[in-house]
């Protein structure tokens, strides 16, 4: 449907612009612009029942309706303030309707004997119930009151909900005629007991009861989830149907050889997960597995095991990380693990000189190097592999779908391992990673004392810094993290300003370093490296140091303005310390006037990243979560996986069945679903290929 909002009745040039400001461009957008609540004007409450909480339900924001005949009118004006009090009664008793405000235009309107309907908030009062009137209607003498459910839309100052509702009402029949094909196949519609598409749209915008509205809304949420889930199922089915990956043979003694090369024994979780990965890699269906593990759980070793198996069968591997810092760190950690097996590692970085890039490209093309570690630079043209068998993607949610696909395209159908230290709540994981198999390192290597965590008011900052100084005197190092780079109107603590203050007043005698996103990569890297070598005592930084950075000697993490971060991110930051043998500390500092104790207490109580992520999800909703933007979740208009989890589960089940029955969605009943999927680029490609 290409009808524009400007083509509708009642939409002039000016309101067209106002609609656009609300993101409503096409007529379909308007149809999909759902009310966020309804005012229930259906039935007045008996005066005698008012104040008994009879109909003041939450959905209507505590408002009540009443209908009565006026028995007294009191009017006053105080400057331009109108104060009108009307006493009215029905057969059960009396109530008072009250208007107070500027420009209410109600003075002189009411007379004894008139019949009046009012809606508003019920005020506490000692005698008769008092209604603070939000809207009213004067009724003719024998006019019956026909109230309705009035939709309330998110509006702007110039384009009030009333206007949106009136445009919808005026054009509803036409809009409904233009609505596209239903995403839900008829059989599924019946099975789920949802209403027909046009009826459901009509009900959402003009329901006759709250229950009916809620049910109609569910069908749109369900349909949206069905599209999302069908897309994922298609990807999975497509992958499973390919038998073009190299089925690697796992030598019997390989695990023992790996273990023999290490100064420690594998954790049970590492052994189990390596088994899962190797078993995937021994199939001719390309592996697509997500390795989840909290910071410090030992993912590097698991990645090394995957690289080792590939190399044993003569296949190369590529590991892609989101930043140069992380890529370099993987180099440093993987190279020694792989050295005993004569696996040569080659860096591919954007900052690399031409000469060293050319050398790397040559060694990868010839097959001499068995592992490339790099950033997006790996995706550049000219970086080719002799025989790529394994693609590893670190912090995969920081790459888009197309980046991940481009890395895989460097080989035929390489096995793919995604890694993340960002715990995703289980509820979300089911939808975000529906086309991935999951492995979870749920056990920490022994020997590291758990990090001690504190939440502290800003008033005690000087004591926190004294604590930092003491740790440094003992030979440790510390991070101080703040949210902003420069000072700005947001009022957030800036690393640049805090750095100046620390240098001048707090730690003039210590070696300080600064890292933030606006510094040139080279400078950032240098500061990080110097911190890693112990040449810097205190690293002042924004969250650029968030994920993966590993300096075992750092034992104190201070996070300023902790109230500005989500729990999951605070947990991530904490993971920067506690990586050595010494006792580590994490201190979250929050402003004196904020009530953060309860929220931060979750972090002081537990170090289980999944529990924290789940709590974060409950507090903030799924939109904020890492990875949701890349997965289509951000485009969900009606549903929220966390909130509507049951609907999601049944939509996913339905999608599985549909894709199993008809992997190309050729049957006419799937035309609507197919059309919706066609609008999403990745699914489009799958449907088009035959
Ligand atoms: P992650 O990448 O999951 O954050 P790493 O792979 O960097 O964690 O491992 C964290 C630290 O634990 C590293 O110093 C690593 O050498 C060490 N480590 C890994 N596995 C074990 C183990 N089984 N026993 C003892 N130490 C381990
Ligand atoms: Mg790591």
Image: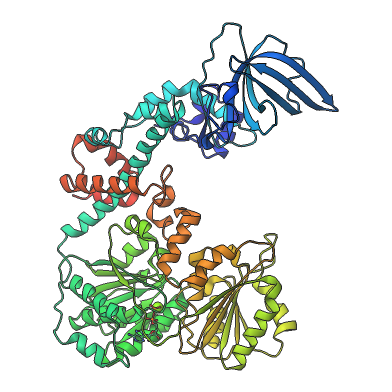
Tell me residue 147's x, y (percent).
52, 19
Residue 241 seen in render? yes
Residue 272, picture quadrant: bottom left
Q: Residue at x 35, y 84 (%)?
A: 334
Residue 626 seen in render? no
Tell me residue 376's x, y (percent).
41, 70
Q: Is residue 368 above or below residue 437?
A: below
Residue 198 located left or right of residue 660: right
Residue 350 located left or right of residue 383: right
The front one of 411 and 41 is 41
The front one of 403 and 630 is 630
Give the quadrant of ligand 1.
bottom left
Residue 432 located left or right of residue 540: left
How many numbered markers are drawn?
A: 0
Q: Residue at x 18, y 49 (%)?
A: 690
Residue 201, picture quadrant: top left
User: In the rendered image, which quarter contains the N terminus?
Assistant: top left
Tell me residue 600's x, y (percent).
55, 67
Residue 354 located left or right of residue 538: left
In the orientation shown, which residue stands out farthest toward the top? 142
Q: Is residue 535 above or below residue 517?
A: below
Q: How is the image coloured?
A: rainbow
Tell me residue 460's x, y (percent).
69, 75
In the orientation shown, which residue stands out farthest toward the right? 79
Q: Residue at x 21, y 59 (%)?
A: 239
């Amino acid at each position: 449907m290409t009808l524009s909002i400007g083509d509708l009745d009642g939409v002039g040039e000016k309101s067209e612009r106002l609609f656009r400001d609300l993101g409503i461009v096409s007529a379909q957008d308007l149809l999909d612009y759902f009310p966020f609540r309804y005012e229930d004007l259906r039935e007045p409450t008996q005066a005698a029942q008012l104040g008994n909480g009879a109909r003041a339900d939450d959905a209507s924001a505590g408002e009540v309706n009443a209908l009565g005949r006026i028995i007294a009118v009191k009017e006053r004006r105080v400057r331009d303030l109108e104060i009108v009090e009307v006493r009215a009664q029905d057969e059960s008793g009396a109530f008072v309707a009250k208007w107070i405000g500027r420009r209410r235009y109600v003075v002189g309107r009411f007379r004894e004997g008139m019949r009046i309907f009012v809606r508003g908030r019920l005020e506490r009062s000692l005698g008769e119930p008092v209604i603070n009137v939000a809207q009213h209607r004067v009724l003719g003498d024998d006019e019956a009151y026909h109230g309705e459910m009035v939709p309330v839309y998110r509006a702007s100052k110039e384009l009030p909900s009333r206007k949106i509702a009136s445009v919808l009402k005026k054009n509803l029949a036409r809009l409904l005629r233009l609505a596209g094909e239903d995403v839900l196949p008829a059989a599924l519609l019946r099975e789920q007991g949802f209403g027909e598409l046009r009826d459901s749209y009509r009900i959402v915008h003009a329901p006759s009861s709250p229950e009916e509205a809620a049910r109609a809304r569910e069908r749109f949420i369900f349909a949206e989830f069905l599209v999302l889930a069908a897309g994922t199922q298609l990807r999975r089915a497509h992958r499973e149907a390919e038998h073009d990956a190299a089925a690697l043979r796992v030598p019997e003694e390989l695990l023992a050889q790996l273990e023999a090369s290490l100064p420690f024994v594998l954790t049970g979780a590492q052994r189990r997960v390596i088994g899962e990965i190797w078993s995937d890699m021994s199939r001719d269906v390309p592996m697509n597995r997500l390795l989840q593990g909290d910071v410090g759980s030992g993912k590097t070793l698991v990645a090394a095991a995957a690289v080792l198996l590939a190399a044993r069968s003569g296949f190369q591997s590529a590991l892609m990380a989101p930043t140069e810092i992380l890529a370099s760190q993987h180099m440093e950690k993987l190279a020694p693990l792989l050295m005993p097996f004569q696996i040569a590692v080659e860096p591919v970085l954007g900052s690399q000189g031409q000469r060293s890039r050319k050398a790397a490209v040559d060694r990868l093309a010839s097959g001499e190097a068995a592992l490339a570690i790099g950033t997006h630079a790996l995706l550049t043209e000219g970086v080719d592999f002799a025989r790529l068998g394994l693609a590893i993607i670190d912090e995969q949610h920081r790459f888009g779908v197309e980046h991940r696909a481009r890395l895989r395209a460097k080989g035929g159908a390489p096995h793919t391992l995604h890694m993340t230290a960002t715990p995703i709540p289980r509820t979300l994981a089911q939808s975000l990673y529906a086309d991935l198999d999951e492995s979870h390192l749920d056990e920490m290597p022994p020997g590291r004392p758990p990090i001690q965590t504190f939440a502290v008011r800003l008033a005690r900052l000087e004591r926190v810094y004294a604590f930092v100084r003491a740790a440094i005197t003992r030979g440790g190092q510390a991070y101080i993290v703040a949210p902003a780079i420069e000072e700005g109107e947001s009022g957030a603590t800036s690393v640049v300003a805090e750095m100046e203050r620390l240098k001048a007043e707090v730690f003039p005698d210590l070696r300080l370093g600064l890292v933030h996103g606006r510094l040139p990569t080279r400078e950032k890297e240098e500061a990080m490296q110097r911190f890693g070598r112990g040449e810097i005592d205190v690293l002042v930084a924004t969250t650029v140091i968030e994920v993966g950075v590993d300096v075992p000697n750092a034992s104190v993490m201070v996070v300023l303005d902790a109230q500005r971060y989500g729990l999951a991110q605070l947990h991530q930051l904490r993971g920067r310390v506690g990586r050595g043998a010494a006792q580590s500390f994490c201190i979250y500092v929050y402003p004196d006037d904020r009530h953060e104790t309860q929220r931060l207490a979750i972090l002081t109580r537990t170090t289980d990243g999944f529990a924290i992520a789940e709590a974060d999800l409950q507090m903030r909703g799924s939109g904020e979560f890492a990875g949701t933007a890349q997965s289509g979740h951000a485009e969900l208009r009606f549903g929220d996986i966390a909130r509507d989890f049951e609907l999601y589960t049944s939509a996913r089940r339905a999608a599985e069945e549909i894709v199993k029955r008809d992997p190309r969605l050729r049957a006419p009943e799937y035309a609507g679903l197919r059309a919706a999927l066609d609008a999403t680029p990745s699914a489009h490609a799958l449907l088009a290929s035959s």
